[in-house]
Image: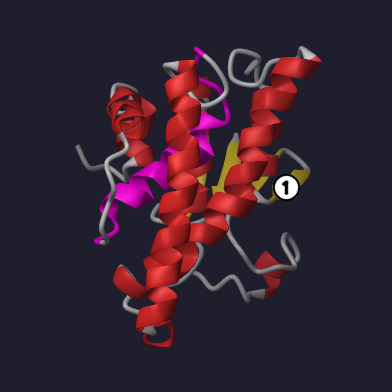
Amino acid sequence: MLRILGKASSINVRKVLWTCAELDLDFEREEWGSGFQSTQDEAFLALNPNAMVPVIQDGDFVLWESNSIIRYLANRYGGEHLYPTAPQLRARVDQWMDWQATDLNGAWRYAFLSRVRQSPAHQDPEALAAACRNWARNMTILDRQLERTGAYVSGDTFSLADIPIGLSVNRWFQTPIEHPPLPAVQAYYDRLNAREGYRLHGRNGTP
């Protein structure tokens, strides 16, 4: 039985849960992270020295880093429909997953901590305005890509890239900032909501 360590509210844990839903994988999940068992516990640090969730245990195999985990699960459990083996198709999926992990992820961090987490260290008006502009710029890049494909991030079919990006799109709409009109992103959001895994994990259980 696959074991997942991490709280279900974590955006990175939700990547793994959504991937399991797409692959119809059974798993056991343990609550680790803020508010639950501490990731500073020696038993957890022995699995992930970075003290971050998620971590998976698949038999004797241990893996951390959410994008690495979902790639592994797709490779291990018949997920070629999510993560194609053809080199160019796979490279396109990897490209957008890496873009999410670097450019897009970095773009929303300050605004999310300021407006959702209400972090006292992230309340500088100029820094917040700059972060919102950068986030909107990256979302515009996504909107143009979705206009080109007419469906999903890497092409006309749902892929592994849509899992981290779909979670980021949910965060965009759920963060109380000004949202410029991005019709392709809105249509994509609606399209993802037709997937049970997204309703359960991508939108954190919200309709």
Q: What residue is disc 1 on?
A: 63
Q: Is residue 36 visible?
A: no
Number of marks in the rendered image: 1
**As rendered, which of 161 and 53 lies closer to the eye?**
161
Residue 173 in magenta stretch:
yes
Expressed as whole percent of the image width and height from the top left, the position of residue 206 reads 22, 42
Q: Is residue 66 visible?
A: yes
- Which image quarter: residue 52? bottom right
- Which image quarter: residue 68? top right
Q: Which quarter of the figure is the C terminus placed in?
A: top left
Q: Main secondary structure of the magenta part?
A: helix
Colour mapping used in the image: secondary structure
Q: Which quarter of the figure is the N terminus placed in?
A: top right
> Secondary structure beneath disc 1?
strand
Expressed as whole percent of the image width and height from the top left, the position of residue 94 reads 69, 32
Q: Which residues fall within the magenta stretch?
A: 156-176
Look at 64% across and 53% down and name the residue there.
Answer: 102
How packed is label 1: few (under 14 Cα within 10 Å), some, or many (20 or more)? Answer: some
Look at 61% across and 49% down and name the residue there.
Answer: 101
Q: Is residue 112 left or right of residue 28?
A: left
Q: Is residue 159 left or right of residue 119?
A: right
Look at 70% across and 74% down and name the residue there.
Answer: 42
Q: Amino acid at mark 1?
A: Leu
Expressed as whole percent of the image width and height from the top left, the position of residue 59 reads 72, 38
Q: Is residue 159 left or right of residue 75?
A: left
Expressed as whole percent of the image width and height from the top left, the position of residue 103 reads 60, 52
Residue 66 in magenta stretch:
no
Q: Does residue 131 sit above or below 194 in this rendering?
A: below
Look at 54% across and 55% down and name the residue there.
Answer: 105
